[in-house]
Amino acid sequence: MDLCLVCFNPVGCYECCVKCLGGIPYASLFATLLCFTGVALFCGCGHQALTETERLIETYFSRNLQDYTSLAYIIVYFQYIIYGTASFFFLYCIILLAEGFYTTSAVKETFGNFRSTFCGRCLSTTFIAVTYLLAVIWLLVFACAALPVYIFYSMSSTCQTITILSETSSGLNQLCVDARQYGVLPWNATPGKVCGMTLVAVCKTKEFDMTFDLYIAAFAGAGATLVALLTYMMSTTYNFAVLKFLGRQGICTRC
């Protein structure tokens, strides 16, 4: 209340604003905004990219419904996982941002009645461990997100090669993209691959370009989320160090 009354005093207004701005955990705020952006890109674009991939497989790589039934189920499961991932990160980022506000050293200086508690330090330790685990898991997600980008890039490069060699070389049908070798379809799928000028025609479709762009955006979103988690790790570690320092200064109380 006293701090709010100071803001109505022109003399103390500047000091009030400085203290308020100093109490903002900029690292946690940056990580939160970056995490929201990254998760939105990864989940939104990844969801649509999986749908378009199923459509491409159904149209060009397999004529038998039984060949890609398992793939269709896997895509549906992944889409549900995406829903859960988006919800979890939204809540977790809000919690970490609140924890950043609570433990920022500038906030402690502004509100002098702050006390470091044993539970507060335990909570910070828990956030460090959970964020570290999430970063390791998301590193694997980031690596997996690069796989479809690589596959579509290989298809695009093969199409460019066929286009360049179409006027000077024969046997272009030997240049193919086989979805079976990537584990997308079983080995008995028919035809399972697209070759030659047919492959070029597939690469020129709007569905291919859109799916490729969606996977690139999802990959970028996964990278942004990974950077956000690493930033959270640094900020939560710093917060824990501050709480531990306050405890050594004799201003620690138990819950």
Image: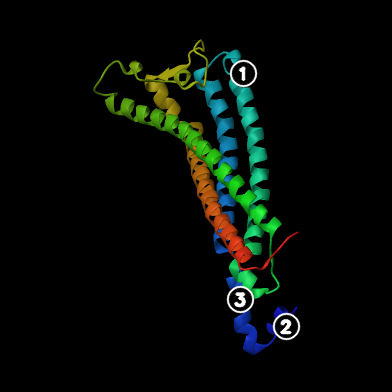
Q: Residue at x 50, y 40 (%)?
A: 139
Q: CA distance from mark 1 to mark 2?
A: 67 Å
Dot 1 or dot 2: first in sequence order is: 2
Give the residue furthest to the bottom. Answer: 11
Q: CA distance from mark 2 to mark 3?
A: 14 Å
- Label 1: how many residues lie within 10 Å, few (<14), some (14-19) or many (20+)? some
Q: In the picture, which quadrant includes the N terminus?
A: bottom right
- Label 3: how many residues lie within 10 Å, few (<14), some (14-19) or many (20+)? some
Disc nearest the viewer among 1 and 3: 3
Q: Look at mark 1 in the image and give the residue it sits on.
A: 69
Q: Residue at x 52, y 15 (%)?
A: 186
Q: In the picture, which quadrant includes the C terminus?
A: bottom right
Q: Amino acid at mark 2?
A: Leu
Q: Look at mark 2 in the image and give the residue it sits on.
A: 5
**9 and 19: which is toward the camera:** 19
Q: CA distance from mark 1 to mark 3?
A: 60 Å
- Secondary element under disc 1, as helix, strand or loop, is helix
Q: Are marks 1 and 3 in contact (CB under 8 Å)?
A: no
Does 43 sit above or below residue 61? Answer: below
Q: Residue at x 70, y 56 (%)?
A: 119
Q: Position of residue 146 (x, y in %)?
A: 46, 35
Q: Position of residue 81 (x, y in %)?
A: 64, 35
Dot 1 or dot 3: first in sequence order is: 3
Q: Amino acid at mark 1?
A: Thr
Can you tell which quarter of the image residue 13 is in?
Answer: bottom right
Does 142 sit above or below residue 238? Answer: above
Image mark count:
3
Can you tell which quarter of the image residue 204 is in?
Answer: top left
